[in-house]
Image (cartoon, rainbow, N blue to C red):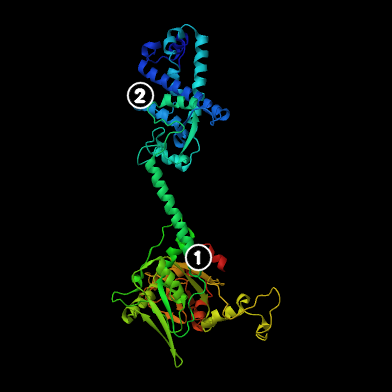
Amino acid sequence: MKCISIRGADTLFEKYKGGPRLKGEDVLCHTCVKQKCNIIRTKQKIADDEKLFNNTKKVLNLQDGDAFWVGKSSMRSWRRLVLEQLSENGDNSNMDKSITASDTLAGTDSSTANEYPAVANDDTSTDQNVSKSCDDVSKLAIKEEKPEKKSTDEDDEENCNLLFNEDVLCEKHGSLDPDESCRKLVPRVIWQRLRDYFPECPEFPRGSPVCDLCCALNHEENQALDYNKQLAAEQRSGLSDLLNDRKRPSDLRNPTEVFVVSSSFVEEWKKFVRDPLKRCPVTEILNCTLLCQHGGFLYPPKQNGLDPASNENVVYLWPEEWAKVCQYFSIDFEISIVKYEEGGQTWFVTSPVSCDECVANRLNQRHREQFQFTDAVLYIRKISKEQNGKMNSLSDDKNKEDPDYNLPDNSANRDNTEEPPEKMPRYDEMARRKSQRHRKVRGEKEVRISSTNTLKELKLEIMKQFAVPPFDQNLSICGKLLVDDAATLESLEIEPGSIIMLQADEPLEDALELQDMIHVSSGPESGFKGTGLLGACK
């Protein structure tokens, strides 16, 4: 809407007709005009106060004079809170908080409504005044509408009903929060302006006492953190080998006793020792998870020794380490293993004794879980008939040709007592370690599938990759043919990441069949009769 002179309105209505005509202050809603003007004056006051705040912060020294505590979140959001408060106090509940130039043009100032009679008499001055007011309001509205970059914390604060300066209060007791990181000091001149907008906000001058209850809670938390740090340092020093996986029991003398704890306890304990300020201390060892329902030990060692890699559910401790563990933690069940050797035979005695039935059930369940997977990768390698007889030796040949895992040619003849050359690593059979990463070869492709899918479904996926129909596919794994199309991959004991060999059947090249296929009649085809193609065939 735009305000024009009576002479201009008469000219427009005489030329374009239409209606109704809105003449002066008789058609204006004084309540709405007052509300619009109040919003404009408030927004102008906000802009002036913002400039004052910025200039005051630069020149004023907060070390001297009166100062007040203001929440940092409130200080960032005070303009929005003023507009929200103004909108809630207005009569119009649908009033927009951000007023644009077109919305505010009808009431640019409180004096504008009283000057409408003069508008009809003075064309030039009216147009200039209205244009100037429009420009001022447009700049103010556009400045307020510009989106500011806000952090995630500020976005979260806007979603909640934040009242001004309530973020300096502690959540439990409503007093001044002892944490000074959430508040800042402002001079009196800024606080008085803010207090004009929010007369009921909490006020805390410099030197106001903080919440005593929160101080006591913070003191207790700091004491608990200090205790955790001391406890972690003591346990790190006493069980350094266990923390760093050094000197673990593997080759035991006769007889030697070792003790057993669960690996889950060791992992949680390591997390606490390495970060005691964020982790809770471990106070007990629950070895009941290592026992079956009959009270027997579920993880007995193999006859070849205590190999930690073969049993990732338990960790073995030396007697010295067990004595310190008993000082630091409470233990529900003590589990120990003793090695005996006699007459060239070696056996282990566990306390409590192992339950053979439950151990067998656990091993069977673990064996079944090896073949259960979802959306895993299988490698399909297409081979020819000539390569079919050499499938079992492909991996061995590959390792022999790999220079990364083979010794130099003269390493076998070198004396073991000879000092290796400088800057040359000395290889040892026990130190040789092969990479677990799969190395793709030519003609090999990946197929993603689950263990619940059947062999027929696997063949359909292979057909998409190699364009070989399922009835022409001969699949095998480790020399074992896969023939049951209705069987699932789990029942066929196919593990994720396995290499499946694909041999495609080729059509038989029978001489008679080929002669029939390539036989061509010497005469013209009867289908060409009556067409122009018959002459071309002659």
Position of 422 relative to 68 (above/below): below
Q: Is residue 97 left or right of residue 240?
A: left
Q: Is residue 445 left or right of residue 212?
A: right
Q: Residue furthest bottom?
A: 343
Residue that badge 2 annotates = 90
Q: Of 289 and 116, which appears nearest the observer?
A: 289
Position of 84 relative to 244 (above/below): above
Task: State the quadrant of the C terminus.
Answer: bottom right
Residue 237's label in the rendered image is: 1
Callout 2 secondary element: loop
Task: State the quadrant of the N terminus.
Answer: top left
Quadrant in the picture for residue 483: bottom left
Q: Position of residue 267 (x, y in %)?
A: 44, 65
Q: For the residues labelled 1 and 2, say whether their Cβ atoms are less than 8 Å apart.
A: no
Q: Position of residue 27 (x, y in %)?
A: 37, 13
> Dot 2: few (<14), some (14–19), or many (≥20) neighbours within 10 Å?
some
Residue 118's label in the rendered image is: none
> Dot 1: few (<14), some (14–19), or many (≥20) neighbours within 10 Å?
few
Can residue 29 be seen at all in this image of the molecule?
no
Q: Residue furthest right?
A: 422
**Residue at the spot 50% in from the left edge and 62% down from the top edge:** 531
**Residue at the spot 42% in from the left edge and 69% down from the top edge:** 325
**Residue at the spot 45% in from the left edge and 15% down from the top edge:** 3
Residue type of the residue flagged with mark 2: Gly
Quadrant in the picture for residue 286: bottom left
Q: CA distance from mark 1 to mark 2?
A: 68 Å
Q: Of 222 and 116, which appears nearest the observer?
A: 222
Position of 124 relative to 479 (above/below): above
**Residue at the spot 31% in from the left edge and 75% down from the top edge:** 292
Quadrant in the picture for residue 13: top left
